[in-house]
Image (spheres, rainbow, N blue to C red):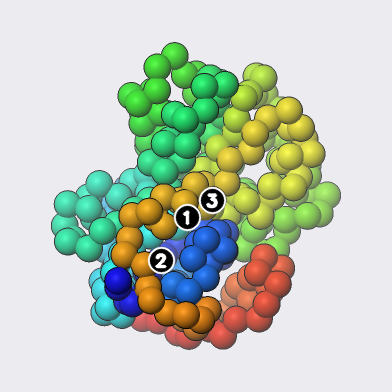
Amino acid sequence: MDNRPIGMFDSGVGGLTVYKEIKKAMPNEKIIYLGDTKNFPYGSKSKQSIIDLSKKNIDFLLKQNVKTIVIACGTATSQALEEVQSIYKVPIIGIIQPTIEYIKSKENIKNVGVIATRGTIRSKSWEVNLKSQIEDINVYNKECPLLAPMAEEGWVDNEIAKLTIHEYIKEFPKLDALILGCTHYPLFKKIIEEQMPNTEIINTGEKLASHIKNMIELSTNKEKAQDEIYLTDTECNFINVSYKLLNEKIELKKATI
């Protein structure tokens, strides 16, 4: 058994959708979460910038003696995962592969949509990995650059959110499943489900939580762990959005990376 914490990072509040699912699956595991709010958004940055920021985030988490690191960010997963896995000895997992494993287990999923940040879509990581691992799958991509900033502002359930999502998804053909390829996007899941009632909406955080539970050595803690939430810039709307998502107030700490 390994009582060290799980490390996790994202560019902002979106990674809390992954955090929520991991806490649901493993409530006794301590999580150290790093939100790089100072450098948000990641989706419009170059690949090298994403790699450099990811390395800084990982270095910070390793100083907290974590046993594994979750990249709770679609952009960083798509552009930095392979690079950082080749550098660090600690196990590092992103949101793509656990989701693909789930889709591979579902014979009825043949037409898949992916919505994500501009950087993620341009990297083609979802499309390449899906097509290389699943025969006869059709992948339809759509970059949605406005959604992550809207999530950071807490605009996840208003008319602006509904209209924006409608514009982004209106040209999709009939889909069996839609992957929320940015961890901010589950905050819009209710609206998306209303607009795509016959499509399975895949929250990557759920799939990652199931995967990591089988991957790590679990803690022997008998009680719910006290997590630590760090931000690189505390002058943001993180508290308000996190309360809506988690239904509890969290204490924030300042991190320097």
Disc 1 marks which residue?
209
Disc 2 marks which residue?
8
Q: Is residue 216 above or below residue 254?
A: above
Q: Residue at x 76, y 45 (%)?
A: 191
Pick the front one: 7 or 25: 25
Amino acid type of disc 3? Glu
How much space separates mark 3 and mark 1, taking CA atoms? 5 Å
Amino acid type of disc 1? Ala
Q: Mark 2: which secondary structure?
A: strand
Q: Are marks 2 and 1 in contact (CB under 8 Å)?
A: no
How much space separates mark 2 and mark 1, taking CA atoms? 12 Å
Q: Residue at x 67, y 19 (%)?
A: 174
Amino acid type of disc 2? Met
Pick the front one: 56 or 25: 25
Mark 1 crowdedness (10 Å alpha carbons): few <14, some 14-19, many ≥20: many
Point out the tag, 2 or 3, that comes first from the N-terminus: 2
Question: Which mark, by number, is residue 206?
Answer: 3
Q: Residue at x 47, y 51 (%)?
A: 210
Mark 3 crowdedness (10 Å alpha carbons): few <14, some 14-19, many ≥20: many
**Would you say 196 lies left or right of 89 here?**
right
**Would you say 178 lies left or right of 22 here?**
right
**Would you say 99 lies left or right of 115 here?**
left
Q: Quadrant of the rendered structure where residue 50 is?
A: bottom left
Q: Are marks 3 and 1 in contact (CB under 8 Å)?
A: yes
User: Which residue ends up furthest to the right in the rendered image?
Assistant: 159
Mark 2 crowdedness (10 Å alpha carbons): few <14, some 14-19, many ≥20: many
Judged by depth in the image, the label closer to the viewer, 2 or 1, is 1
Which percent across, then down, holds residue 62?
26, 74
Point out the tag, 2 or 1, that comes first from the N-terminus: 2
Question: Which mark, by number, is residue 95?
Answer: none
Which percent across, then down, holds residue 90?
22, 63
